[in-house]
Image (tube, rainbow, N blue to C red):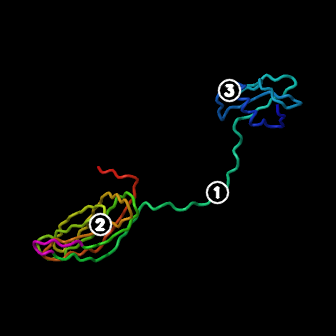
Amino acid sequence: MKRMKGALPAALLGAACGLGGAGQALAQDVFRGCADSATHELRPGSVEVNDLPACKPRETQHSWNQAGPQGPQGPQGLQGPAGPSAAWYRNGQPLVVLPVSPLGTTQPWSDVGAIDLPAGQYVITGTAILGNRSSASDPAAVTCALASPYGGVTSDTALYAHDTRTLVATSGFDLPGPAQVQVKCRNANPYGDVLVSNFTLVAIKVGSLVQQ
């Protein structure tokens, strides 16, 4: 048996747990045992858990706990690098004029704004502020698209003379590679042009897309 001075060795503590019949020791358990007063050797059969042992005349009682006192807090570590961004946005005032569409024709799309995104799954919202500059009584039918190389969504509105309206489109996008998402608009009004005075794009990266 290894001689000890003061506190009991950790290895001896493990042996004492088994000999004392403690079973699975808990953090609050207190172990007590009898050690020879001259040699400081613990008598294994004397170990008790949360109870007083029967020490012999030439023995000294010792007590200990399976967990030592908490040490001082270590120094604060260095700050880690910033994580990848999970949201992107862009806005602007493009002042794009959507020209008239003569009857029986369809105007091509006019680019309003775009945002560049890395691969991933996103929920993206695009808005466009539209103004009908015509004085005709018939409303202007305007369509805007939120588009990527992998798909998109459209939104329609009707603007009466000198009317201003915000058109909003929201959709989920699964981008297998880096891609540009655009806001595009076109005018089906044969009487006057429509001005796109402002746009906003907001893209939020998500872990998965669930359409309801």
User: Circle 2 — which element?
Assistant: strand
Q: Which residues are magenta?
A: 101-109
Q: Position of residue 89 (x, y in %)?
A: 38, 66
Sooner in the amino-acid sequence: mark 3 or mark 2: 3
* Tags 3 and 2 touching, CB below 8 Å: no
User: Circle 3 — which element?
Assistant: loop
Side (left or right) of 96 relative to 53: left
Q: Position of residue 92 (x, y in %)?
A: 34, 73
Q: Residue at x 17, y 67 (%)?
A: 158
Q: Residue at x 83, y 35 (%)?
A: 4
Label placed on residue 127: 2
Q: Quadrant of residue 160?
A: bottom left
Q: Quadrant of residue 95?
A: bottom left
The verdict on residue 108 being magenta is yes
Q: Which residue is mark 3?
A: 22
Q: What is the distance, in whole Å, between disc 3 and disc 1 at their CAs? A: 38 Å
Q: Which residue is mark 1?
A: 76
**Mark 3 Cα-neighbour bin, 10 Å: few <14, some 14–19, many ≥20:** some
At label 2, the amino acid type is Thr
Viewer-nearest residue: 174 or 125: 174
Sooner in the amino-acid sequence: mark 2 or mark 1: 1
At label 1, the amino acid type is Gln
Q: What is the distance, in whole Å, between disc 2 and disc 1 at their CAs? A: 45 Å
> The N terminus is located in which quarter?
top right
